[in-house]
Image (cartoon, rainbow, N blue to C red):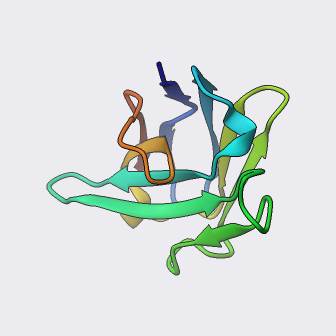
Amino acid sequence: EVHLVESGGGLVQPGGSLRLSCAASGFTFSNYAMNWVRQAPGKGLEWVSTINGDNDDETSRTYYLGSVKGRFTISRDNAKNTLYLQLNNLKNEDTAMYYCGIVGGTERGQGTQVTVSS
């Protein structure tokens, strides 16, 4: 059974930083491309970033939503079965619940709240 646990969110001022983590279990983590999505209050899910896995032609290649490119960095530690998202230079519009997931999968954790406010 796939199990995903997000953590690391919090309240931060504009321009601040956070590091989100996603602890994964129940599947061979290293094989799969993983992504981060977010949901702002009153809005639908928005894809944020993807990192390829060992099953992909370009292992560990990364992809970003245009509005976060250059500010967010996705990474993974396959030895720890953990996915990360480094959030720098945060903006008010980054406020959302952030979720990790397997690309093409439907499972999500409980999410971690990121609130950017002065």
* Residue ranking furthest to the bottom: 66
* Residue ranking furthest to the right: 79
Residue 90, can we see it? no
Q: Position of residue 66 (x, y in %)?
A: 52, 81
Q: Which image quadrant is residue 61 in?
A: bottom right
Q: Which residue: 43% across, 54% down?
A: 37
In the depicted structure, whether residue 2 falls above or below residue 107:
above
Please count the marks in the image: 0
Q: Which residue: 38% across, 35% down?
A: 107
Q: Closest to the observer: 72 or 15? A: 72
In the depicted structure, whether residue 82 falls above or below residue 99:
above
In the depicted structure, whether residue 51 falls above or below residue 107:
below
Left or right for 35, reference 108: right
Q: Closest to the observer: 12 or 62? A: 62
Residue 23, can we see it? yes
Q: Which residue: 62% across, 64% down?
A: 89
* Residue ranking furthest to the left: 42
Q: Which residue: 50% across, 77% down?
A: 67
Q: Position of residue 54 (x, y in %)?
A: 78, 51
Q: Which image quadrant is residue 47 in?
A: bottom left
Q: Position of residue 76 (x, y in %)?
A: 75, 44
Q: Position of residue 40 (x, y in %)?
A: 28, 55
Left or right for 7, reference 58: left
Left or right for 1, reference 61: left
